[in-house]
Image (tube, rainbow, N blue to C red):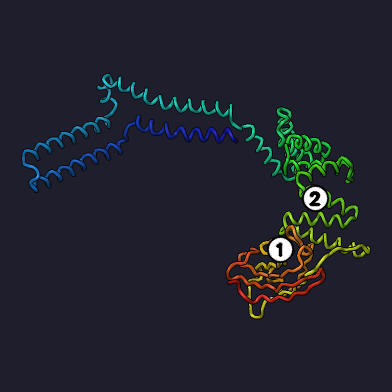
Amino acid sequence: MFWLLTICLFIVAALFVVVPLWSANRGGTQESIQLRKAANIALFHERNDEFEAELAEGNLDQSQFDALVLELQQGLLADVDLVERAAAPEPAKAKIKTKRSPLTRSGITRNAIPLALVLLMSVFAYSLYNQWGYIDDVELMDLFQRTVNNTADIEETRSLIVSLGEVVQADADKEWAWYFLAENFANLNMFPEAQIAYRQAANRIEGGPEKALILGRVALAMYITAGLEFTPEILEVVEEARALNPNEISILQLLAADADQRQDYQSAIAYWRLLIQASPSSEQARLLRESIAAAQRLMADSGQDVDAGPVVEVKLMLAEGIELDPNLRVFIAVRNAQREGLPPLAATQMRVADLPATIRLDNASAVGPFNLSSADTVYVSALVSFAGTANPSTGDYRVVSDNFAHNGQHAVIDLVLSERFP
């Protein structure tokens, strides 16, 4: 595909040179010759009228006028003669062929030079690109993109494994080729092979979030290979990844899943809350909040201490007489009253069609680095957004409660949406 596009672009570029040369050598068509002849005659009449006007105004005497008109007539005859000679048939032109041959050879030379330069520039550009270009990376990006777009196509996965395997055999230092090779192994549930390829990729990256991401894949492949149990080797990889990025998603997911499986709900809840902070408004965050609530219920049923923290119960309704699109989004948030400008301590959203409603917000509803327990004094805001965003705009319906101290207990707040944001 790359070379096909390159050839197409070369042809288009060459046409910018070839077409003008071809048009110039081909000479005018009968239609263009007639147009040139008509233009010369029109120009003659225009100039002749100007001379007559100058004569009438006394700017020219009769002898000057006659001389200028004669010169103009001679010029017209010469121009028309050239046009007619260009339109003459081949036998008529043959009479002057011998005399014009030096000019013809000169024209051929002039035309050959641009064409030769076009070809030489193409060869020169190809040579330079072959020496310094990134064609290998372009081809690799195609393999990477195919891996990303692959949707459980076993034949495609096998083909990619072969292609990427050839790449790393030819150059073992291509870390991302190792990574995507491992991704394809994992797609076929070949986790021992995936673990080796992931490790090869991680060993070739200096550090930072990218290496932490790949180490997360290494740990996951090792965890599956070990029968869904942690081993000292897996924990070592986990610590290595968290030293680079404490909030690496795949590591947190692995730790949370393991804690949940062992029924260590307190640890699982802690990891789930960290995952929620990575994308607080996503569908995944909503499911994690449900998991937290379910884990807390299981802890309470088994008599374990549940550190639910403060709870803010918001009873929200629209004022009587206000009719809004039932699909408009409603944002409810609890904020720190003593520190403005921070993200909400807890937040959720719904639609106007869900109102009136009672909303429960607690530490599991955190959407940032701080939760309800981190602030002593808070306030609640509710917003009906016409733009569908959590930031209020002119015309939105918004209500804000007074500041209050939750005291780590259960607080109930009644709010009525009745006024528009200025």
Judging from the image, what secondary structure is the residue with disc 1 in?
A: loop
* Residue 406 percent location from the top left of the image: 78, 70
Alpha-carbon span between mark 2 and mark 1: 23 Å
* Along the line of sight, the residue nearer the viewer: 248 or 163: 248
Q: Name the quadrant containing residue 153.
A: top right
Query: Are there few (<14), some (14-19), or many (20+) residues within 10 Å of tag 2?
Result: many
To which residue does mark 1 refer? Answer: 344
Closest to the observer: 109 or 41? 109
Name the residue: 7% across, 46% down. 58
Residue at the disc numbered 2: 252
Amino acid residing under circle 1: Pro
Q: Percent x, y for residue 386?
A: 61, 67
Q: Residue at x 27, y 19 (%)?
A: 98
The residue depicted at 89 percent of the width and 41 percent of the height is 232
Please indicate, yes or no, whether residue 306 appears anywhere in the rendered image: yes
Q: Using residue 136 as the reference point, say whether residue 182 is left or right of it.
A: right
